[in-house]
Amino acid sequence: MIEIENVTKQFDEILALDHVSASIGENCIFGLVGTNGAGKSTLLRVLAGVLKADEGEVRIDRLPVWENPQAKEKICFLPDTACFFPNATAEIMRDYYAVLYPRFDVARYDEMLEHFGLNPKRKLATFSKGMKKQVSVLLGICTNTEYLLCDETFDGLDPVMRQAVKSMFAAEILSRKFTPVIASHSLREIEDICDHVGLLHKGGVLFAKDLDEMKLGIHKIQCVIPEPLLEEELLSELPVLRHEKRGSLLTVIVRGEYREIERKIMEKQPLFSEILPLTLEEIFISETEVAGYDINNLIF
Amino acid sequence: MTSTISFSKLVRAEFRQMSWLAALQAVLFLLLIPFRVLMALSVKELNALDVLCGSMGFARFENAPVVLVMGGACALCGFSYLYSQTKLDLYHSLPVKRDTLFAAKYLASFLTFVLPFGAAQLLGLLTGVLYGAGSVTLSLEVVVCTVQLILFFLCSYSMTLVAVMLTGKLLTTVLAIGVFGCYLPLLIVLGDYFVHEFLAFCEGTNWLWAQSDRSLLKHTSPWAFCVFWGNGVEVGRVGLTGRWPSLAGLCQLVAVAVLLSLLSLVLYRHRKTESAGGALAFRRLEGVIKIMLAVPVSLVTAIIAYITFYDSGLWELVFIALFGALFCMLMEFIYRWDIRQVLMHKWHIAVSVALALAVFFGFRYDVLGYNSYLPEQDELAAIAVREEYASWDYPTSEGETTRENARLLDYLESDEVGLLYGICEDGAERAKTDGVGNYDENLRQVNVKYCLKSGKEVCRSYEVDVKRYVSGLTELMEQDPSYKERFYPVLGWREADIVEISGTFYSNELEDLDCSDEWCEVIVPAGELGAVLAAYQEDLRTLSFEQIYHSNSYLGFRTRKQAGISYMTDCYPLGNEFKHTIAILKRLAEE
């Protein structure tokens, strides 16, 4: 488990992290989302022990991360821009990682390079951005660390590769203790892979929750109620987070128990009614509005 | 190191990343050492051992600059990752402590030098052995020389590391290396200039930076220490190939390397990862460094104005303000890399200019009253006064040139304070009103030593009125004849002490000598030395200091100690009042 306790980090006049507290459980895929400059990369760097927090502490499985090789052996950090040695090949990087990460799986790395069609003897400098990302992800996975900190990892990968990486993460979770923490500025990007999400804004965590838990308490309903008076009654009876009317179609996002909401709608004799799946964006919109933020200014 | 990661494997992995640097150095040192030895040995007429002795070991000291440059280059290459945030993301997220990473990088970079250099030295020696020039002593000297040059490398390497740790990008690192290498030596030169130009400084007439053994200068930077190696205690006996380094010298090198390496480790620990890419790693130092550099630069420009515009206070002020401000702005540009921000810290400019003005004009107008210092008469136990330029030697111990004045003043010390105090008073008053460096024929430069009753000794140099000086010393010599004996050492000589007396006299200066020509030269025959000496001593004892002082000719005495040194002769005053001496010289001139 990663515990982030009251972490603050300031770069000169810029407050990048402002008393951030959160915890990331084991064997889940944690999505760290937020706008550009929200502090996602800074938080990941603090988690990886690259940056020292000005205040607060980060612990991995109860071990403080800063200057602690025992804790850092459990994590591998994949930064936004992959770093390879000048003139290095995928093989050279493998050998270096194998020295630093004792559980590095050399055979699997070679096998996956072949699977992805990456030449292990070709200089990485000649690889495309996406190919470099692939090598970086393969190195990260083959270190066999419990936690993989990915900063904008999917950025630059083609849709097929994106899917392949997601599948690899899922397979890793099934086969061993593995917790990827994926930072991204795009909610849609990580919507279908993360089961836990944390929203970072202006250096602070707005919330960090289980996605299913959030979905259970919020529902999106589309219905057509012919009588305007009944429609008004419905809106006043339900704990509506957001509603919109286009023509005669009423769309409502409501917090509450599904059966109870359905019963109340049926009472108003709708011509049509349906419960739709909520996107991550819609969940955030409603959750953050509750928290007092105008989400439209935060997420695009 | 760590429980799971092998330190040696880490060093090997780091070394592999820098193998290109090792290869480059291998080529360089192979050309510089064994190849050169081979070329020299191929000349068949020469003795192989002589050739080898001239090509290796301490004889090849020109290898030192190459080694120093390599020290800087290896440190820069090994730790260049500190300039890149991307590289730091990789290195600082690895499961190793920063100390371990530092040690691995340090060792790997060091090995890129020591392996090719050691191999080149060995190959050079083996080449000699193949030509039948093997010698145990020579081999030993090559080994010691290798150790010495490796220590040179470590000094330069660790100094560069300190510069790397303090900065965040290559440009500022290079500038910092220059500052570490040259700042203090140049500051000493500058300080020396100020002291000698503006202070009536009588204690050490020699310039500190020009000391023969460079003892002060070479301890101001690792480069200076290596460059001026061989002028002091660091070298010992002469061997086959040159002078061996002394154990003390090697220990000093080790101490410098260890201290600087530890300092760089401490800086590395405290250096923030996010400082990569910035000018300085510790931004709090920005102002201090800027001011520390801007002040000496402003002072140098003030000196240029002082020399160029002949003592113009206005131009000195303008130069300090202008160049001080410009330098601060240049530094700010280096820090921010944005010309719009050069005036970001105006108070840095203000402080730098104010400090430079204070130092320059403080020295120039003797604000602290150094030159016009005059203790109360009743505080004094003794005084010594002597004219700056005497044309004869005093029997003081030799060797330590920097304290020559002080030693002479010790010798001439007198407790007749009242008689000499007037001279000092005149000098101090003149320094207060007119300053120093006034070249006037009615003034004389005198060195003074005050022995205070408290036991303290203070030396000063004054410009005094010549009449005041002469009357003071005349009175003193009349009251205390023993002072005259000390003042003119010739009075204590015997015939056996001198080997030659000679002089060139002009008829318009010594009318009584009756030179037939415009001038005549007299070299006293050996048999007459005693007679001339006795006559001169009698004249000197009889005449007053005033009479002696105004003599316009000189008689040269070469002592037994000065024999064989062509330029050394004690020249004592000779005038028409020296009746006995003139009489003998006249006779000798006629003969």
Image: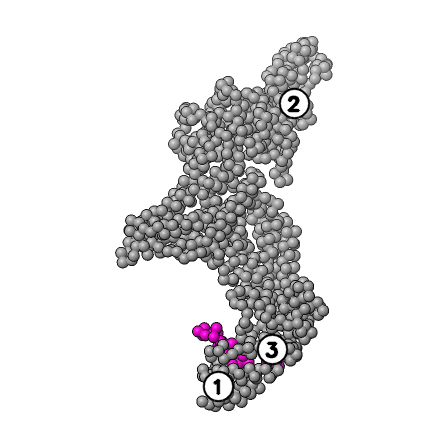
Identify the element where label 3 is drawn: helix
Front label number (1 vs 3): 3
Kind of residue sitting beneath label 3: Lys
Rate crowding at label 2 as few (under 14), some (14 to 19) or many (20 or more) other CA atoms within 10 Å: some
- Over which residues does the magenta segment extend? B545-573
**Which is nearer the eye, B350 or B580?**
B580
For the point 61% across and 50% down, which residue is it?
B288
The residue that disc 3 covers is: B484
For the point 53% across and 31% down, which residue is it?
A69
Residue A137, position in %: x, y?
Answer: 48, 28
Q: What's the CA distance linking mark 3 and mark 2? A: 106 Å
Q: Which mark is residue B519?
A: 1
Chain letter behind tag 3:
B
Identify the element where label 2 is drawn: helix
Chain letter behind tag 1:
B
Whether A25 is among the magenta residues is: no
The residue that disc 2 covers is: A287
- State which quadrant residue A107 falls in: top left
User: Is residue B216 positioned above or below B412 on the image?
Assistant: above
